[in-house]
Amino acid sequence: MYRRAQKGIGYLAQEASVFRKLSVEQNIMGVLEMTKLSKKEQKHKCNELIEEFGLEHIRDSRGDLLSGGERRRTEIARCLAVSPNFILLDEPFAGVDPIAVEDIQKVVRSLKEKNIGILITDHNVQQTLAITDKTYIMFEGRIFKEGSPEDLASDPEERLKRLEIERQERAQAEQERIRREQRLAAENAAREEALRQEAERKKQEEIARAEAKRKEQERREAELAKQLKEQERLKTLEKERKIAAEKAEREEALRQEAE
């Protein structure tokens, strides 16, 4: 962006380019801070752009809370922060409602009045023809028609081709929608499979822990039984030793009595 600004070129991408967690004012000031303007001049320029594009009521709103039209106006205001000679607008009408389309058209007309060159690429032919001075219609990668919006709008062949282009665009949009749904379905299936595998892993771990606990309990019970059996054997041996000792004493007593 800095190199483009040095060359006097501003660029508005098709995808949202606002900093989502920053306010409208912070988005514009973020660009102005890269210029050679003083802090006071930056603040003054920021206020001018906010007022010019009707952003005063949302200057403190975060980028992720803006509507499509508000986001577009913020992005265009940010482009103008570097005082460009030319602005490249890529699909400026994409993803915005009809009211926002009119707002953007008004903005483009005001930029033209400031003698700023504007290059627009857009699939919305009708909205684009309403604000351009010269138009090129491309079909299958080549320029199909060129001329003023009035000439192109009144050309029967161009209208037919435009209908074909719009039909192809609708078909592409439908294919993209199907691919997006398939991708989402695949992602959901992958997540569900991952959850299933995780649940199965936890189940197997629980079974393994239960089995290990059961074996440990059996080992302890076997060890206890072994200890009890050993104690019983020792008691029996002690009892037999006492009986043998008593018997020997009696026999010794009888022998002494006989003598």
Image (cartoon, rainbow, N blue to C red):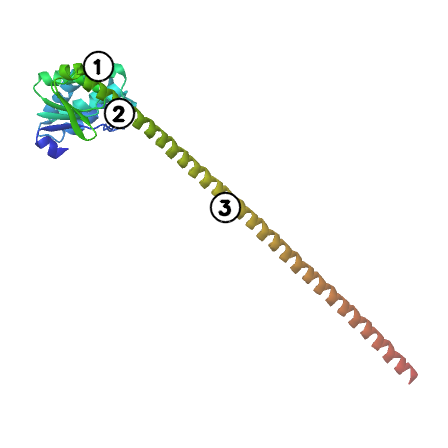
Q: Name the residue furthest bottom.
A: 259
Residue 201 marker: 3
Q: As drawn, is 229 to the left or to the right of 75? A: right
Which quadrant of the rendered structure holds the N terminus?
top left
Q: For the residue marked with disc 3, what is the amino acid?
A: Arg
Residue 105, image x, y percentages: 18, 16
**What residue appears at the point 13 percent right and 27 percent down from the top-left corner?**
10
Disc 2 target residue: 63
The numbered mark, 1 or 2, whose residue comes first in the sequence reads 2
- The nearer-to-camera label among 1 and 2 is 1
Q: Is mark 1 on a helix, strand or loop?
A: helix
The numbered mark, 1 or 3, whose residue comes first in the sequence reads 1
The numbered mark, 3 or 2, whose residue comes first in the sequence reads 2
Q: Determine whether 137 is above or below 248 in the image.
A: above
Disc 1 target residue: 102
Q: For the residue marked with disc 2, what is the amino acid?
A: Gly
Q: As drawn, is 169 to the left or to the right of 224? A: left
Mark 1, residues whose alpha carbon is within 10 Å: few (<14), some, or many (≥20)?
some
Proximity of marks 1 and 3: CB atoms separated by less than 8 Å? no
Q: Nearer the viewer, residue 205 or 172?
A: 172
Q: For the residue marked with disc 1, what is the amino acid?
A: Glu
Q: Which of 140 and 215 is in front in this view?
A: 140
